[in-house]
Amino acid sequence: MAKSQIDHWETLVSDNSNWRYQIPTSNTPTQWYDTSFDASNWPIGQGGFGFGDNDDNTVIPTNVTSVYFLQKFNVADLQSIEKLLLAVDYDDGFIAYLNGQLLVSRNVNLNAQPLWNSLATASHEAVLYSGGQPDKFYFSKAELTNLLHTGMNTLNVAVFNNTPNSNDLSGRCFLLAGISDTVQTYANPPAWFSPPLELFKTNLPIVVVNTQFEAIPDEPKIDATMGIIHNDQGDTNSIHDPFNEYFGQITIERRGSSSNNFPAKSYGLETNGPNALNNNVSLFDWPVDNDWILYAPYTDKAMIRNVLTYQWGAAMGNYAPRTQLCELVLNNEYMGVYVMMERIKTNPGRVPINPLLYEDTVDNHLTGGYILKLDKTTAGGIIAWNSPYPPASPGNGTIGFQLHDPALDTLHPLQLAYIQSYVTAFENALAGANYTDPVQGYAPFIDIQSFIDFFLANEMTKNVDGYRISSFLYKQRFSEGGKLVAGPLWDFNIALGNANYCQGNTTSGWAKNFNSICGGAQLIPFWWNRLFSDSTFANLTHCRWLELRQGPLSDTVVMSTIDSLAAVLQGPAQRHFIRWPILGTYVWPNNFIGQTFAEEINYLKTWLSNRLAWLDANMVGTCDNLSMPEPQKEALRIFPNPSDHVVFLEGLEKPSCVRIYHATGALAASVRLSSYTSAISTESLPNGMYYLQVDGNPTLFKLLILHL
């Protein structure tokens, strides 16, 4: 671990020092924080200030909504100060100035200068009295040289209540300095303080994000800057190196559902140019884009479960988000190991479908460009429609489909009707009596190998969230194949033996049987058990498993990949677990609690080795041929399907008679086509399922007519 430039920390201003303070009135000057303001007539009181509920030394009347206080202090030698820390414990909002310059604020509306009777914009509880840590704000040497000066300095603070009749108001403030020499000049740090870990050098890329101390909300995104230091492969990255991978504007927000409650937050961000325009860039030689994720592997103490799973997905030949382990510095504070990765979206180099535009409402363009997901709604998801089928028995509840890209509120009504009708037609076919029929069953609707690979990834990792949460599907255009594709893979941080509930810790059994294991309102669709009741699908799955086990998912390849990632993380893991001292401690939903990073890695490897052996011995189906059958190319292409007012036939070898039969078998229409690519009007046919047959071709082509 690299040695920090800071030798020790000292206190410049303590909360329990004697401060000048005032309960402000309309007569209090609005520039009370200015360096020229004379506060000599303000009373002197010992901090903190508030209503006196065991955390305030100076008690103020309970009918006030704010209190101002300031402290003058001397700096003997500015050059010896490497870093500055402002720590504030408050109820409910505050604003702080140093030498007349705004330092930081929380829960204060800065659209105008806060007045004496302003209210905090949100509620916030002081925590020092109960053993908690105050909010901390670090300033780098470059920043503090514009804030501090040798000699006398002034720190001004105002604390505001959230409501006029609140039963609590509190403000305690500290100013600490990281000193580069060994000389003791100021006071000792307070008892709650632990020196922050300083990132100096690392073998991983360094991501530096600066929000100007604005708190990052769950939504919407706020403005910030981001710089990435990434020297050539194998070279050491220093926090003092120039930003050479990216430097520019971003917008950023917190993301996640359960993970949003962890101390280490995950973030979604967009790279921006001037005037908040998207700035499509290539990070780490990935395809250009502007949507990225900074994922915090807090509950995954091996830190590589998502990275591993996405690599396995890519090795299967499917798109999976690209990842890069890195270390994050946020507002001058080291935040530990993170994973930079691509956000799932429709874009070249990501999900391999053409984008769907609002005006794409007819013919081939209508038939693809949709990314769907099954997920919780706690992170802001909106259900687009509900499946007409209940979950796999004995689960109960309703399965809802969400639109991921494009978002539901950007879809044309015709597009929503199309994708809902297509997915429902797939479910109807899968639930129907002829579901195993290659023409009348489920097979024409889905990319079978993608469903098999999706199953194998979720089962290899025994993903307790699998199939029901963070589960994506996308729909191709007819010209791209027209099928519903399972994936991309997403969110495997509590897979691979990292969950202590619903048998997520065991290496035997099927994750697809989660509904049976956990009971209640568990929402794994009926699809998977139904698919595996088809011997053809089961046998193809067995063959695919054997094929992968002889290649990218062999024991040798899998274990060497884990070892390689663990080796890269040796130094960063030491820093990470100093920043987040959770080794040897339960973090939801850990099954194993290792005392060291090496123990966490060894547990992962042992668990996975046992899981692979169980799958080898218990894989569904049988296999006589180790390769997937080559998909048959249809000479005749029919689109769009479902059809509204017209259906196109492409690939006719000669002029032909085309018959359309109702699902009952009755002839609904007969059309003579004189050209090899022709259109048939379907406006006169009622909504419903039909079968189309061309003279000389025994195949019945399923056609759904849906007038929108």
Image: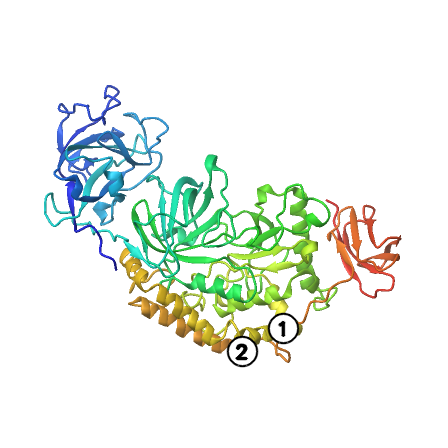
User: What amino acid is at disc 2?
Assistant: Asn
In contact (CB < 8 Å): disc 1 and disc 2? no
Of residue 439 and residue 336, the one placed in the foreground of this image is: 336
Residue lying at the far top in this picture: please name it: 27
* x, y percent for residue 145: 23, 37
Q: Nearer the viewer, mark 1 or mark 2?
A: 1
- Residue 121 seen by the camera: yes
Q: Which residue is mark 2?
A: 618
Q: Earlier in the sequence, mark 1 or mark 2?
A: 1
Name which residue lies at 46% across and 45% down: 270
In the image, is 315 to the left or to the right of 412? left
* x, y percent for residue 648: 79, 51
Residue 540, labelled with which disc?
1
Q: How many marks?
A: 2
Name which residue lies at 23% across and 35% down: 147
User: Quarter of the image containing the N terminus?
Assistant: bottom left
